[in-house]
Amino acid sequence: MSITVGKLFGNGTVLYQMKLLAGQKGLNNLVEWVHIIENDEVSEFLHGNEVVLTSGILNNTDGWLLEYTKKLYGVGTSAFVVNIGPYTKSIPQEVIDYCNEVKMPLYTIPWETRMVDLTRDICYRIMQSEQVEISIATTIKNIIFKTGDLETLILQMERYGFLRDSHFCFIVMSFENKEDKNLEFNMNRIKMYSEKLARSIHELYISFSYKDCWVLVLVNYGNYDVKNFVNSFFRNWNEPAWKVHMGVSENKDGIKIQADNFNNAFTALTMSRKKDKEVVFYNELDIHKLLLNSKDKEVLKEFYEDTLGKLEKYDKENNTDLVNFLYMYLQNNGSQSLVAEKQYIHRNTVNNQLKKIEKITGYNPTNLEEKLRFYLGFFVKDVM
């Protein structure tokens, strides 16, 4: 729950005579840190999501401040504060217009306000916000993993505004890039991107890392809001080199029962990875839901080996494709005529293939119960 520009400077007018000149639509931008930068080469100092203060010492040519502002926006600056004085006497209208266009808050402070005082206050507020964020994340994890007294933990969450009957939806994200192994930096990028998006929909959320995944908990978001978040996430994700998989739990009320909801999000993530899908919703898993929650994975493996396993082995040894043929047969409701039509083969050929499958596996694909066995085998294959 990183602090926003709006909250950071909520009392700036009173304390520092700050004036917001532009970028009001960016007040929900998240802030990680603050810098005083007078150098033109801003990219050397910034990672993104920072507040930048400047007096404009180098502001001695027309258009300099606009170009400087564009550079700040280009590296992901959250807000820009200009110290009005001997170097920058006023803000050109073109700079105000640009900040409004890109939704980057632009503030001014008078020369009498010392930038060091403002930065000290900003740093304190950011660190205070981080401590609250850590405390909330630790508390919800203790509830999930059943560590400590439950009622005490719930009361602690309520002090932060998360009520015991709130709705919780867990979204778990994994990401990979074979070319970039800097997991920590890029997890932070995911954190800031997802938090900014979540806050644009609703204010309450929790986020933390777990097992190399990023967990975002949407609190009191409607089902439409959850879908909106997911769709917006992938629609606006501009890091094509990074592959993101997402698992989404159900949207359940009651803080006491969120342990299962948390695990269900990881169950959905497992299917997202296995099926190579961007996102899988737990409540859409159907039969996979039962299989993924099976505690005895060895039973599933034995079932698979007893059905499709034999067929896979035969295909491998004889360079045939009976597994895919059987899948098509099942997908067409066991209609031999439809399979013959789609495969451009005679119906007798279909019948012969089915008999061959029966001979290899010992199960008759035309028998309803044994057809179900094969169908279940394909579902087991998905989760193995």
Image (cartoon, rainbow, N blue to C red):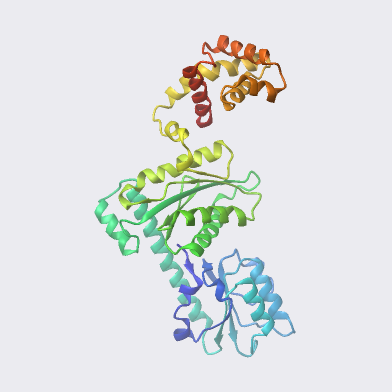
* In-front residue for pair 209/127: 209
Q: Residue at x 49, y 22 (%)?
A: 372
User: Residue 350, relative to residue 284: is it above or below?
Assistant: above
Specify whether residue 135 is in view. yes
User: Residue 152, relative to residue 377: is it above or below?
Assistant: below
In x, y percent, where is residue 201?
A: 49, 62
* In-front residue for pair 181/330: 330
* In-front residue for pair 382/195: 382
| Residue with the most extreme top position | 359
Q: Residue at x 53, y 26 (%)?
A: 378
| Residue with the most extreme front position | 337
In x, y percent, where is residue 230?
A: 53, 52
In x, y percent, where is residue 93?
A: 67, 84
Give the position of the N terminus as an image quadrant.
Answer: bottom left
Specify whether residue 35 is in view. no
In x, y percent, where is residue 24?
A: 55, 76
* In-front residue for pair 351/15: 351
Q: Residue at x 63, y 76 (%)?
A: 99
Q: Residue at x 50, y 87 (%)?
A: 17
User: Residue 294, relative to residue 151: is it above or below?
Assistant: above
